[in-house]
Image (cartoon, rainbow, N blue to C red):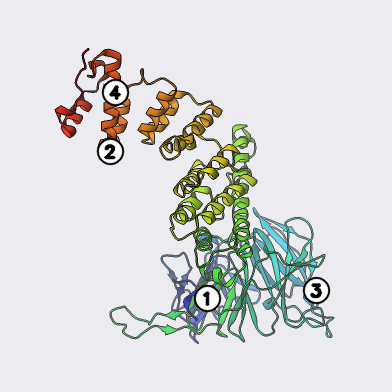
Amino acid sequence: MGEEDYYLELCERPVHFEKANPVNCVFFDEANKQVFAVRSGGATGVVVKGPDDRNPISFRMEDKGEVKCIKFSLENKILAVQRTSKTVVLPEKRSLKLLKSQNINVNWYMYCPESAVILLSTTVLGNVLQPFYFRAGTMSKLPKFEIELPAAPKSTKLNLSERDIAMATIYGQLYILFLRHHSRTSNSTGAEVVLYHLPREGACKKLHILKLNRTGKFALNVVDNLVVVHHQDTETSVIFDIKLRGEFDGTVTLHHPVLPARSIQPYQIPAAGPAPVTSQSPVPCKLYSSSWIVFQPDIIISASQGYLWNLQVKLQPIVNLLPDKGRLMDFLLQRRDCKMVILAVCAQMLTASDRAALSVIATVFDKLNQEYKKYLDAEQSYTMAVEAGQSRSSPLLRRPVRTQAVVDQSDMYTHVLSAFTEKKETPHKFVVAVLMEYIRSLNQFQITVQHYLHELVIKTLVQHNLFYTLHQFLQYHVLSDSKPLACLLLSLESFYPPAHQLSLDMLKRLSTANDEIVEVLLSKHQVLAALRFIRGIGGHDSISARKFLDAAKQTEDHMLFYTIFRFFEQRNQRLRGNPGFTPGEHCEEHVAFFKQVFGDQALMRPTTF
């Protein structure tokens, strides 16, 4: 398989530590995401490394026996070492204060640092879980809940192992993931992952079941809100997205893998030693090794090789593995770094080789604009709340975050539509249909269409002499009125004479002042269109010659400058009997420029009667 087939990969820069051996013990702290390499019980050194630590922490301890567990407090302020099952030692002398105690028989526990929730396994079978929530130095008891075991247990031994339970935040909600090796229903073969939603308030509920359709050894990660299930026997992984539509049976939603099972992308371990000395090639890493240990949310550790990786999702390969464009968009819109991939998909579905049906293109546009509208509404609500002074009374009021799922009109114009309209081989009817479909979608979600999209439609219609269609679009207000659009129409008068009147009608509907129209046209270097407009309303005798000559000179079009200069010479002759400019018009530099380019003899001579 090529690189484009793997949708999971290990991070490029893993944490490298001394691998586990009889002298060196390795521990992992899930809260700080740190690896501890403890040599000889700490006597010959402890090295602590984390993914974000630029400098590892190194220190020594007295060897007082085997270390069972070792951790730092947050921000590495206090070190705690456990050497027996009942004692934890703080190397620095500190006083501890008991804040709260609970009397519960505990089989095992699990802690989720992101949500500050601890889960205790209770009862003989171990399947009644008691969660506690820590906040600001207090501990709150949440309602306990029961994990449904695959079938009625035959013995009264511990049936629920901590190996089959994981805790992770998915789409901002805390879930308990239970790996059930055999389905509760007899007609279903294979294991499944059951997701229990654990809210801060209220009872824990079973909401989702992920169907694995295979048996064997599994491990779970959560990456970018996707549940990743690794299968050791086949050395492959699958991903599940609980936001995608599944099969709802009235109580829970059943999900199947989003994509076919694939291995994690092959990984090369760099050869040890300094670069100049190392001549041997990198060593392939043994993926899905029995020495791999998986931690939440996205950590894979190989103690035997001395590496800690973060698991990552690659979006680009998924584009070709998920042919349903609607489902692909639903999937991509939930991913963290999705924008450029989404825009690439939009561009691809408009190419000759991969052209999608117009109905599919419409679906994609609607999904993008639904997300865009959601953000615009949230932004507007925030602005109104701030203007109303609610930000002072409500400290929870926060500006909405613009995620990469917000693909706005400028993104679509710059990365997709602009290049699409310039492709000569694309049938112009399809080009116009796609542009109008995007505008239809924006209107459907009540998003104000930016004028540059209307300009793109008009330029495409003019390019292919589709003036009748243009006239209809304007007449029936398919293209919304705007000043830039009116200016564009004015500039089209030489190709399509009715455009002049269409633009004036639009400007009147917009209640635009005449001098403002002239300013807009001049700013867009539409000097002749501005002059025609002024003549059309009879204001050409009082306009400033210098303003028009300035604008004409800026275009660097000498023939345009000549035309405008000659017009004002003729005006001067008609109004004053002399083509020359008066000192009050401040046109001396333009007269000099005219002489320089066209020569003195090109100046108009006064006509006498």
* Cα distance between the residues tagged 3 and 1: 35 Å
Of 136 and 580, nearer the camera is 580
Residue designated by label 2: 557
* Cα distance between the residues tagged 4 and 2: 17 Å
Q: Secondary structure at mark 4?
A: helix
Q: How many marks?
A: 4
Q: Secondary structure at mark 2?
A: loop
* Cα distance between the residues tagged 3 and 2: 81 Å
**Tag 3–tag 4 contact (CB < 8 Å):** no
Q: Position of residue 556 (x, y in %)?
A: 27, 38
Three-letter code, disc 3: Glu
**Which callout, 4 or 2, points at the residue further toward the start of the chain?**
2
Three-letter code, disc 2: Asp
**Tag 1–tag 2 contact (CB < 8 Å):** no
Residue designated by label 4: 568
* Cα distance between the residues tagged 3 and 4: 91 Å
Question: From what the image shows, is residue 274 above or below residue 592?
Answer: below
Of 338 and 383, nearer the camera is 338
Residue designated by label 3: 148
* Quadrant of the image occupied by residue 555: top left
- Which labelled disc corresponds to residue 476? none
Q: Position of residue 534 (x, y in %)?
A: 41, 24
